[in-house]
Amino acid sequence: MKTGLMITESISAVHNAVQDRIENIVSENFNAIEEYFEIRKMFKEMYKMENSLPFDQLRKNFPDIYCAILTHEVHKCKNLFKKNIEKGIQQDLYVKDVLDKQYITFYYTLIFTINKNKNIDAQLNKLEIEALEYHIRAMSTPKGIIELERQINKMDTPF
């Protein structure tokens, strides 16, 4: 039991640090589309350093802890996406009648399915950008599409 508690506390500390970084990005008041790109960049930097073996071991050896962490992360992520959509609607970047729950679930499923398939990094990066572009373009106003294209053109390495 002590091992499980120690694992849970360690992972919570990591996730809290990630949440703090996301909150810092949100507090910089980027527009909704730019915010997506900034958060994606942050995760990209983190994943470069991440070794997935500990999470694979956690899933195998402590499935209850793994499921609890995953459930918590799904909730946090979906909440972040929901707030971003609300912000984008207020900024006239996303259409007003966007069905945010459907967009949130679809994008979440798409992006995490891509990241589960650890192909060649270049292919993974291209798929992530295409998924993000597809997601934003599907709910964007003409003003939002202009901002989306600006963000894509501004990327260090688009694909």
Image (cartoon, helix red, strand yellow):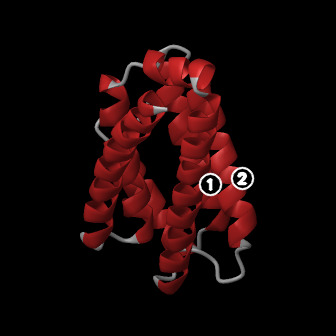
Residue 149, picture quadrant: bottom left
Determine crowd level at label 1: few under 14, some 14-19, many 20+ residues with C-alpha closer than 10 A.
some
Determine crowd level at label 2: few under 14, some 14-19, many 20+ residues with C-alpha closer than 10 A.
few
Quadrant showing the C terminus: top left
The residue wearing badge 2 is 106
Residue drawn 33% across the image and 67% down it: 26
Vertical relation: 157 (above or below) 132: above
Can the viewer see residue 10?
yes
Tell me where residue 125 appears, x and y as whole percent: 47, 29
Vertical relation: 147 (above or below) 132: below
Tell me where residue 131 appears, x and y as whole percent: 60, 43
Vertical relation: 1 (above or below) 109: above
Horizontally, is 9 left or right of 85 in the view?
left
Residue 44: numbered disc: none
Horizontally, is 102 left or right of 146 in the view?
right
The residue lying toward the viewer, choosing from 156 and 48, is 48
Specify which label sits upstream in the sequence, 2 or 1.
Answer: 2
The residue wearing badge 1 is 135
Q: Nearer the viewer, mark 2 or mark 1?
A: 2
> Mark 2 and mark 1: span between their CA atoms?
8 Å
The residue lying toward the viewer, choosing from 39 and 31, is 39
| Mark 2: amino acid | Phe
| Mark 1: amino acid | His
Horizontally, is 93 left or right of 108 in the view?
left
- The answer to whether marks 2 and 1 mark residues whose Cβ atoms lie closer than 8 Å is yes
Tell me where residue 105 appears, x and y as whole percent: 70, 56
The secondary structure type at the circle numbered 2 is: helix
The secondary structure type at the circle numbered 1 is: helix
Tell me where residue 13 appears, x and y as whole percent: 31, 45
